[in-house]
Amino acid sequence: IWFKKIPLGKNRLQIFTLDGSLITGREKNTPTGEWQWEVLNDKGERLASGIYFYVITDTGGKTKSGKFAVIR
């Protein structure tokens, strides 16, 4: 999945299930304003089909959030 138009610099990506369980949390420097995520949890396993939420937070505390579907 590509996340685009995110703040430049260091960002934190968090992925949650519909019930609010954290699937993964990662930090990355994003000099291009884009982040590619491999759709894996913290154990390296592929996510199951379903609806998920994301939150991207920059070092200034600004957030971008949304939802996406994984269809396998």
Image (tube, helix red, strand yellow):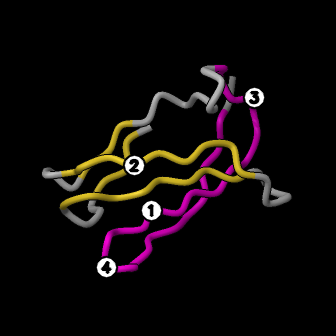
Nearest to viewer (mark 3 / mark 4) = 4
What span is colored magenta in the figure? 45-70
Q: Circle 4 is placed at which residue position?
A: 60
Q: Residue at x 60, y 21 (%)?
A: 44
Q: Say which residue label 2 marks.
A: 27
What is the chief secondary structure element of the magenta stretch?
strand
> Which of label 3 and label 2 is nearer to you?
2
Instruction: Say which label, 4 or 2, has the lower sequence index.
Output: 2
Residue 41 occupies quadrant: top right
Mark 2 and mark 3 in contact (Cβ < 8 Å)? no
Could you tell me the amino acid type at mark 1?
Ile
Q: Quadrant of the C terminus?
A: top right
Measured Cα–Cα span from mark 3 to mark 1? 21 Å
Distance from disc 1 to disc 4, alpha carbons, whole Å, reads 12 Å
Q: Which residue is mark 1?
A: 56
**In terms of secondary structure, where does tag 1 sit?**
strand
Kindly report which numbered mark, 2 or 1, lies closer to the viewer in this rendering.
2
- Let me know if residue 66 is in the magenta part: yes
Residue designated by label 3: 48
Looking at the image, is mark 3 or mark 1 nearer the viewer?
A: 1
Crowding around mark 1 (Cα neighbors within 10 Å: few <14, some 14 to 19, many 20+) is: many
The reply, left or right, for residue 4 in relation to residue 14 is: left
Q: Nearer the viewer, residue 2 or 8?
A: 8
